[in-house]
Image (cartoon, rainbow, N blue to C red):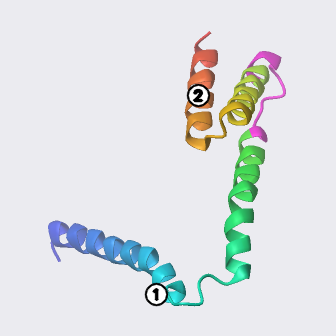
Amino acid sequence: MSATMHSLLIVLICAGVTLALRAAPFAFFGGKDGVPPVIARLGKLLPPAIMAALVVYCLKGIPSGTVLDGAKQLLAGAVVVIVHLLRRNTLLSIAVGTAAYMLLIRI
């Protein structure tokens, strides 16, 4: 099999899996009954839980040797929290927090 054919096959398989994953909720829950309460509850609880896990993962690597580097990470995290509490927009919070961190590490 040529490298081009191999790459094309990989792209097609990835596209098929993505399409199947995107269509699955409509196939399973598209009827008159709607979404089961358990799935609806998971849809509300999982995003904050995932974000909390990501925060813990990101902050676990704060260097203990240099206070300034750790302070920059914590300050950027505080910026994310403040922006999110003020605007309630996750994408904006992440973008502003990333920009704040990038600015802080350059100082």
- SS under mark 2: helix
Q: What kind of element bears circle 1?
A: helix
Magenta portion: prevailing SS class = loop
Residue 42 drawn above or below residue 35: above
Q: Give the range drawn in magenta.
A: 59-69
Of the pair 25 and 30, the residue shown nearer to us? 30
Based on the picture, tell me whether residue 65 belongs to the magenta stretch.
yes
Instruction: Name the residue that disc number 2 marks.
Output: 96
Above/below status of 25 relative to 2: below
Q: Which residue lies furthest to the top in this view?
A: 107
User: Based on the displayed image, in which of its 4 quarters is residue 84 positioned?
Assistant: top right
Label located before the other in sequence (2 or 1):
1
Residue pictured at 46% horizontal, 87% vertical: 27
Q: Which amino acid does label 2 sit on?
A: Val
Q: Are marks 2 and 1 in contact (CB under 8 Å)?
A: no
Q: Position of residue 98 (x, y in %)?
A: 58, 30
Label 2 packing within 10 angstroms: few (<14), some (14-19), many (20+): some
In front of the other: label 2 or label 1? 1
C-alpha separation, residue under disc 2 versus residue under disc 1: 37 Å
Q: Which residue is drawn at 75% across and 64% down?
A: 45
42 lies above or below 91? below
Q: Provide residue 77's location: percent of width, then percent of height.
A: 73, 31
Reply yes or no: does residue 52 show up in magenta. no
In the rendered image, residue 74, in percent from the top left (x then y), is placed at 77, 27
Quarter of the picture holding the C terminus:
top right
**Label 1 environment density (alpha carbons within 10 Å; few <14, some 14–19, many ≥20):** few
Q: Check disc 1 and report the residue beneath it.
A: 27
Q: Residue at x 54, y 90 (%)?
A: 32
Corner quadrant of residue 69: top right
Q: Is residue 89 above or below residue 13?
A: above
In the image: residue 64, left or right of residue 93: right
Q: Which amino acid does label 1 sit on?
A: Ala
